[in-house]
Image (spheres, rainbow, N blue to C red):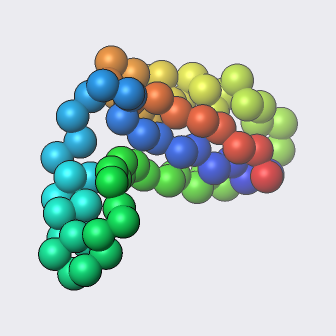
Amino acid sequence: MKARVHVMLKTGVLDPQGEAVRHALTAMGFDKVEGVRQGKVIDLDLAEGATQADVAEMCEKLLANTVIERYEIEMV
């Protein structure tokens, strides 16, 4: 079984990497980009019997900084 975790900064938290990407895109002529939020995707190969609750616990304890980040779990 596999799980994919999407981790993004919460709304309202400044995203300097996203802003740098937005600025670079604008400098390259992509002037229709108004904002960029950068995050990360974590793919997990799970043992038989692992649950979404197990993955959520991993996110809470290690994979996401829940003070400033939110996460979404996709079981595949």
Q: Is residue 47 visible?
A: no
Q: Quadrant of residue 43?
A: bottom right
30 or 48: nearer the viewer: 30
Q: Residue furthest right?
A: 49
Residue 11 screen position, x and y as percent: 38, 27
Q: Residue at x 51, y 52 (%)?
A: 42
Residue 34 screen position, x and y as percent: 33, 54
Q: Residue at x 66, y 27 (%)?
A: 54
Residue 30 screen position, x and y as percent: 31, 75
Whether residue 20 sits left or right of residue 67 in the image: it is: left
Q: Residue furthest bottom?
A: 28
Above or below for 60 versus 22 = above
Q: Residue at x 17, y 63 (%)?
A: 23
Whether residue 56 sits left or right of residue 17 in the image: it is: right
Residue 56 screen position, x and y as percent: 61, 26
Q: Residue furthest top?
A: 67
Q: Is residue 41 visible?
A: yes
Q: Residue at x 79, y 52 (%)?
A: 76
44 or 33: nearer the viewer: 33
47 or 8: nearer the viewer: 8
Count every numbered label the image shows and give the total: 0
